[in-house]
Amino acid sequence: MSELQTYDEMLIRREFEELIKLCRKNTNEEGIALINKAFEIANEAHRGIKRRSGVPYILHPVAVAKIVVQEIGLGYKSICAALMHDVVEDNPNFTVDLVKSVFGETISYIVDGLTKIDVAFDKDKSGQAENFKRILLTMNDDIRVIIIKIADRLHNMRTLDAMPVEKQQKISNETLFLFAPLAYRLGFFEIKSELEDLSLKYLSSEEFNEIAEKINATEAGRQNFFDRFIEPIEKKLKESNIKFNTSARTKSVYSVWNKMRNKSVNFEEIYDLFAVRIIFEPTYLVPERTQCWHIYSIITESYQSKNERLRDWISTPKTNGYEALHCTVMAFGVWVEVQIRTKRMEEIAERGFAAHWRYKDDTAQEEELDRWLAKIRDVLINPETNAVEYLDQFRFNMYSSEITLFTPRGKAVMLPKGVTVIDFAYTIHSRIGDRAIGAKVNHKLVSLSYVLNNGDQVEVLTAENAKPVREWLEYAKLPRTKVRIETALKAEVQGHIDHGKELIKNKLAEFNVEPQSRVFTKLCAAYGVATKRELYSKAGSGIIQLDDFEKQLKENPPQKSAIYWGFDLIKKIIPGTKKTVKKDEFETENSNEAVTEPVAKIDKKKPFLLKETVEKKLTYKAATCCNPIPGDNIIGFEISDGKVVVHRQECPEANKLAAEHGDKIIKVKWTTHKILSFLAFITMRGIDRIGILNDTTRIITGEMNVNMRKMNVESHDGIFEGTIELYVHSTDDLENLIRKISGIKGMEDVRRLHRFDT
């Protein structure tokens, strides 16, 4: 055995012993024996196989198993499945039946589910939307499959350095698009934050590093503030004989970056950079909820509370199981968020509701999880749903904040923020939804499209003759609502078709006409419909009246002729004509003109150069949903042979496309642009004075020779705010322009405005 092999064996043995040490805390000897067997099978199946980083492959399933036990808290069956999650796929000698014969049905079922996910996902290709849908379908079976898959993705993200750049982008976008929202919805808050941070690290490394450095640089100041803030609270908690510990939890890098982008603010303008957390041991003599409110009263004895920021998740926990009391107080001129939790609540928040309760003897909490899974099943009942639309709908439930609504009798109903009356109606009962005509919200009459707010009391008004209409789909927000509306509409259409079919059949029989294709061709032309199905539907619904049926049967349709010219012939007739390719899903609705005929295939082994030609044309398409300009961090997609569309790296549309079509990602590289200009947006704020606008336009058009497209300025109480749309050659030009404008007297803040229209 070589020295390297000896080292690998030592490394493998050390990592596995660490896993066993973690398992012994909550696993009996029978479970430990099964874990050892699972390791032996996995080690044999992956023997001699290396990861891209050069380490033995077996270290990956061991690491996933450690995440499962240490960071999520699943039991020995899940640990065994995590160890063997790649065995069946990677080694044909190890089958699901073999796993079942050794470990039993439950473990083999989980391993089989993980194998099917990997096959659907196809590690060497893109995670297509349809494959995502298949992954989510596994939640119908055993949720441990998804939980272990999240652990698998977490370890892959932690070891992503060894992957090529385009693979890093594909995997990071998939992670942001699906796995981080799933982790959040299942209550794995720490894992969700780490997945987001790691994704940002690979998608926008410069911004990630810059924010991380600033967070680290301000750590000492935050600690001093925390010590001053918590001192009077800790003193009073001790006087009340409460056992507790306190900490200051800093926002994740991704959370800070996301807030900077969404609010168009600088790092220095984010004041809620950390939250204070108080975790206490409750006494069994007093309900946890009462004790949380007692601690809240202690806090507000020292600091003034901001009542509109009070969040009570102990009375009505989130559907992912999260419980806590959040309040925001004023301290030393700064608003500070304080989170109050028991140790039990902390464990759920850290490890996740599903993992902590699903497989323990607490039927009440298990029922809560089952109710959430039932909502997911509502989305899964319509297999005809377009996969991309399906994911968009599913993600609405993943990240949406929750609101509590009330029925007329006071029953609480928790739904995602942004839902409408029609969503509420279908949540109560599909029959109520189908017959809804309006509602009374807080005793005031509103329409079905009314957006509900937290605490609203809703009484749905119905009528027996009411029925769903297609317009409801436009303001229904919940996936299950849309599924139920579509189901009702399809049933109605099918009823019209069946009725119309019977009407036309009887009419044809009345005039002794055989139902032949030429007869239906004549009838479709006569009644202005394209298909026989449409003819049936419109006849059955009464849109088409059959009073003149005999006349239409006897009348001969006018002769029509059509000439089809091929593209080559058209090109000869009209010199310079370019063939256009139909827009595909990689182009947003805002994208530039139709793609011209490709001239050459893209060599994916080297970067595609983004450049301009002397004819004032681009070799690529700049997506107008995010308006990338030369110098931006970007991601490229091949939309057809030889054609590339470019998005900014942080564009939500790019994130979605990269997740669904990772195989279309290509390496792209900016070149210098001196001829063509690109649309950019800047926002400015300052003290209003005579001449400040003139100074601004003089710099833009005079000194910098930049063309403006639009300017919007408002002034109020001596302060002005404005936005400017202009054309620049690159980010360097834009930064120089911002620097120049910032130097104008009275100008307080000038920055680029990031717009993402998706």
Image: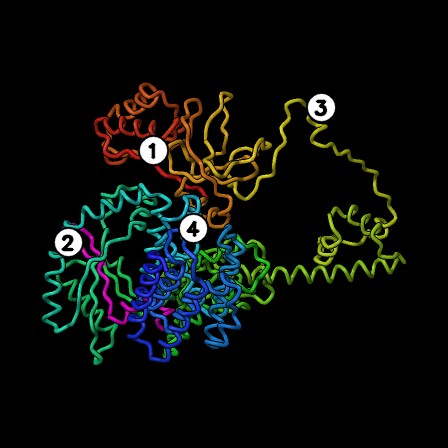
The span from disc 4 to disc 2 (Cα, nearest Å) is 36 Å
Is 349 within the magenta?
yes
Q: Who is closer to the viewer here, 286 or 506?
A: 286
Mark 3 neighbour density, 10 Å: few (under 14) some (14–19) many (20 or more): few
Task: Please tell me whether mark 1 sits on a helix, a strand or a loop.
Answer: strand
Q: Nearer the viewer, mark 4 or mark 2?
A: 4
N-term-proximal mark, 3 vs 1: 3
Rendered residue at 31%/51% (across/down): 255
List x then y, in percent, for residue 539: 74, 56
Q: Secondary structure at mark 2?
A: helix
In this rendering, the label closer to the viewer, 4 or 1: 4
Whole-Å distance between the Cαs marked 3 and 4?
49 Å
First of labels 2, 1 by sequence position: 2
Residue annotated with mark 2:
223
Residues in magenta, as a range: 328-357
At horizontal 16% and vertical 72% (from top left) the residue drawn is: 243
Q: Secondary structure at mark 4?
A: helix
Separation of disc 3 and disc 2 at Cα?
A: 77 Å
Mark 4 lies on residue: 171
**Residue 450 spot, x, y in % from top left:** 45, 56
**Front position among marks 3 and 1:** 3
Q: Earlier in the sequence, mark 3 or mark 4?
A: 4
Q: Amino acid at mark 4?
A: Ile
Please tell me whether residue 134 is drawn above or below residue 353 in the rendered image. above
What is the C-alpha distance between the residues marked 4 and 1?
32 Å
Residue type beneath disc 3: Ile
Residue 440, above or below 662: below
Horizontal arrangement in the rendering, residue 120 relative to residue 546 (left or right)? left
Q: Is residue 112 above or below residue 570?
A: below
Which residue is denoted by mark 3 in the rendering?
A: 573
Q: Contact, CB < 8 Å: mark 3 with mark 4?
A: no
Q: Are marks 3 and 2 in contact (CB under 8 Å)?
A: no
